[in-house]
Image (cartoon, rainbow, N blue to C red):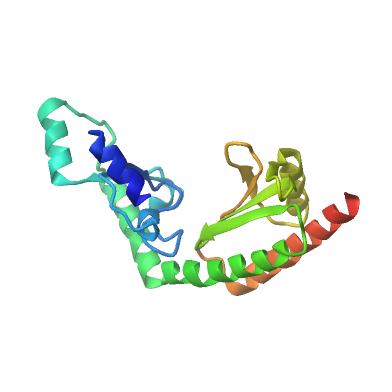
Amino acid sequence: MARAAEMVRAAGGLFIADEVQCGFCRTGRWWGYAKLRFTPDIVTMGKPMGNGFPLAGAAASREVVNTFRRQNRYFNTFASSPLQAAVGSAVLDVLEGEQLGENAERVGGLLLTRLRALQQRFPRMGDVRGHGLFVGVEWVSDRDARTPDRDGAVRVVNALKDRGFLISNAGALGNVLKIRPPLVFQTEHAEAFLEAFEATLEEDHARA
């Protein structure tokens, strides 16, 4: 990603990091880009910033902001209200006070390790990747050929829903199981999820 940022800047562009899903400790670090060891020119952020309250923001260097303001007039009716500021501040207090970044790193590491162990048993699990509590599992019909299986991914999502766990299928081909639990997810919750996930895979494997 750092190399991609260099190429964008060399071509005269700005590199924008969308942190709406991976920001605010989701990956075990405050920002997803910190895991990838590069610094963007602009960062956008949203949903977890307000924990359900409509709140979003953008951050950029002073140079970028001043250049924009010299060339453009910007106005926002609902920007910077005291209520939004109070909600955002409370979210930051909880993230720091309850050490949810450290929790995401620890519990997410457990999830990845155990999912990769399951990958050895179930050939429909393609690539298993992620950081913190942001994990993706490619669902494939042929692991060697990496043939995407969207229908199979949907089947797994629905089977897990029936067992009380909500995940989704995502990605350009719709075949990635997106596992993104709340940041308060603890080891016991991860164990319960993994038990349901393994049972789902065994059921699916028997059906195949």
Residue 106 relative to residue 154: left or right = left
Q: Nearer the viewer, residue 13 or 159?
A: 13
Q: Quadrant of residue 195?
A: bottom right
Q: Residue at (77%, 59%) from the top-left corner?
A: 122
Residue 95 relative to residue 122: left or right = left
Q: Residue at (36%, 60%) from the top-left corner?
A: 30
Q: Residue at (51%, 72%) from the top-left corner?
A: 106
Q: Position of residue 79 (x, y in %)?
A: 26, 38
Q: How many marks?
A: 0
- Can residue 134 be seen here? The reply is no
Q: Position of residue 118 (x, y in %)?
A: 72, 65
Q: Quadrant of residue 8?
A: top left
Residue at the extreme top? 72
Look at the picture and state if 199 lies above or below 59: below
Q: Residue at (44%, 71%) from the top-left corner?
A: 102
Q: Position of residue 192 (x, y in %)?
A: 70, 68
- Can residue 162 be seen here? The reply is yes
Q: Nearer the viewer, residue 7 or 60?
A: 7
Residue at the extreme front? 144
Look at the picture and state if 148 lies above or below 144: above
Q: Position of residue 21 (x, y in %)?
A: 46, 49
